[in-house]
Amino acid sequence: MSVARRQRTLARPVAVTGFGYFSGRDVRVEFWPASEFAGITFIRHDISNSARVPAAAALRINMPRRTTLELNGVRVEMVEHVLAALAGLRIDNCEVWVDAPEMPGLDGSSQAFVEALDSAGAVELRSTVQQIVVGDPLRVGDDEAWIVAQPARSAGLSICYELDFGAQSPIGRQVYANDLTPELFRHEIAPCRTFIPEDVAHSILAQGIGKRVSAKDLLIFGPSGPIGNALRFPEECARHKVLDVIGDLALTGCEVVGHIVAHRSGHALHAELAKRLIEQAEHTGQLPQPLPHRRAA
């Protein structure tokens, strides 16, 4: 049985700067403390201080290769690495102020966000964190790609990701599984970078997207492995997929207690599982009243 911990927020504001992979635009991300039950909210202060987008599964819109949220015409893109850093370090309440739609790609991982958040420090609040404790298994996807939530094998969240691009892929088949703690997230998951096959990278560039991105900014896989880069872990790609799952499950607005197994899944399936977990928890009475950061409006 899981014991709920107390909610946490930042001790002081902190910022990270970079540029968006897709847009090429410079962006500054500021992390600010927030009150209990506030959840995670993105604020597009380049539009206005009231241009707020809660990190909620109901607000996800379909865009390729990234998690994007939109509310009342206000959009924030590629939020998964930011959300993973906050969730991985158990920062439950935070305002994320940004001056552009797309979050910075940095090196394709959550490491810079984690370093910034750690430098700010965290404080405990009075109320306990809201949890979704997985009961009956939930599965979304098909035979080719799927993700399932099962009852917890420990007191928290554990994830197993099976990555398989086929025998001809230079990425190969990888599996990574672990019980998640902030310490493990910092050292074993946060540094793991996003990746892309070389032919897909050329296709994206041909569309006029990503022209500011180089092989040093993420992992681009050619026939012999990463181009102009070296792996940080043998199964870095599978670990990065675990990072994505953590960020996308943060769209529940709760701490998920359960065991997640994923096979070739992506952001759309992760977000669908987040929605289903909310529905199940509301149905069973775990979440009797939807909070503002879980609502669509």
Image (cartoon, rainbow, N blue to C red):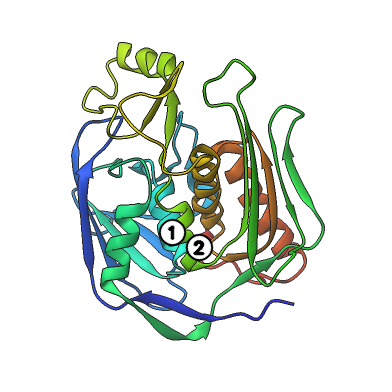
- How far across and down, in percent of the image, does residue 158 sit? 65, 59
Q: Secondary structure at mark 1?
A: helix
- How far across and down, in percent of the image, does residue 2 sit? 69, 76
Q: CA distance from mark 1 to mark 2?
A: 5 Å
Does 238 appear above or below 260?
above
Q: Is residue 55 visible from the viewing direction of this image?
A: no
Q: In the rendered structure, are the residues bearing label 1 and label 2 in contact, judged by CB atoms less than 8 Å apart?
A: yes
Q: Quadrant of the N terminus?
A: bottom right
- How far across and down, in percent of the image, does residue 14 sit? 22, 65
For label 1, the crowd category at 10 Å Cα-Cα, with few meaning under 14, some 14 to 19 and many 20 or more, is: few
- Residue type, mark 1 in image: His
Q: Is residue 66 visible from the viewing direction of this image?
A: yes
**Left-right relation of 206 to 283:** left
Image point (50%, 49%), residue name? 243
* Front one among 153 and 145: 153
The picture quadrant where one finds residue 216 is top left
